[in-house]
Image (cartoon, helix red, strand yellow):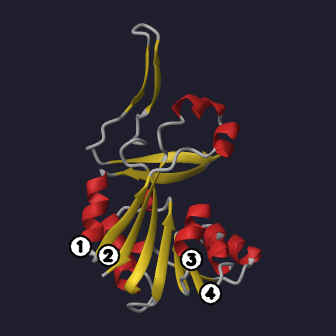
Amino acid sequence: MPMAAAHLAGARSVLDIGCGEGQVARLAAGLLGVERVVGIDPTWAQLAVARERGGGVSYSQGVAASLPFPTASFDAAVACLVFEHIDDAGAAIAEVGRVLAPGGRFLFFLNHPLLQTPGSGWIDDRILGEQYWRIGPYLVEDKTLEEVDKDVWIPFVHRPLSRYVNALVEAGLVITRMEEPAPPPGFLARAAEYAEAATIPRLLFLLCVRQ
C-alpha cells in the first residue's frame, strides 16, 4: 500500500483493475489531488462489499480484457496481484494501454513470476547440509486452482516475465521503474515459516508510462 500511494502521487483520475473489496481504490481516493477513482471487478459480491465500505470511489462490474471505458479515460491505472488470475493477460494489458492517456502511468504489482513460480520454495537439504530457494518450472505456462478460503477457489496462471514485458511493449507502455521489495517485517511476524527466505522477494512491481 505505501508503494501504491507513492507512485500514484500527482494522479487525478485512477482506475483500479480487479479492485476486489476496494482497498487500493480507497487509498487512491484519499490522495491529494485525486479527483476521480473507479474500481472494476468481475465479482458482484466483492463490489457489494466495496460499495459498503465507501471511500468516495465509483465501482463498475467488468473484466480487464474488455474495460468499459473510453480511450484515454485515466491518467493512472493500478493492478495489484490481479493479472495472475486473468486468462488473457495480453488482451488485458492492451486494454490498460488503451484507457490510459498519453503520459499516464500503470502500477503493475505481480507475484514475482520467477521467484514465486509454482513449485518454488525454501529447501533445507539436511543430506547435503545446504539451504536454498528452489525455483519451479519457470518457462512452463501453467494454470491451477488455489483454495484461498474454505470452498473458495480461484485460478492462478503462471507465465514467464517475458510474456508480461512483451505485452506491455505492444500496448505502448514503457517500463520506467522496477522494484523487488523484501517481505516486510510485519508479514514475517505473521508468517514465521518465511523468515529464512526473507531475502527472496514475493512481489514484483513495474511502473510503466503510456507513450
Image height of 21 relative to 201, above or below: below
Tell me, for residue 52, which label it has, or none. Answer: none
Q: Earlier in the sequence, mark 4 or mark 1?
A: 4
Q: Position of residue 177 (x, y in %)?
A: 39, 63
What's the mark number on residue 33?
4
Task: Give, as a three-letter code, the residue at label 2.
Answer: Ala
Query: Circles 2 and 1: CB distance less than 8 Å?
Result: yes
What residue is at 37 percent from the left and 76 percent from the top? Answer: 209
Point out residue 16 in the picture as x, y percentages from the top left corner: 54, 74
Q: Is residue 19 visible?
A: no
Q: Residues within 10 Å of mark 3 (few under 14, many from 20)?
A: some
Q: CA distance from mark 2 to mark 1?
A: 7 Å
Q: Position of residue 14 (x, y in %)?
A: 54, 81
The reply to whether callout 2 and callout 4 are in contact (CB within 8 Å) is no
Q: Which dot, 2 or 4, sits closer to the camera?
A: 4
Helix, strand or loop at disc 1? helix
Q: Quadrant of residue 37?
A: bottom right
Residue of label 1: 170
**Would you identify the image quadrant in which residue 70 lies?**
bottom left
Of circles 2 and 1, the one toward us is 1
Q: Are marks 3 and 2 in contact (CB under 8 Å)?
A: no
- Is residue 23 toward the left or the right of residue 183 in the image? right
Q: Residue at x 56, y 62 (%)?
A: 3
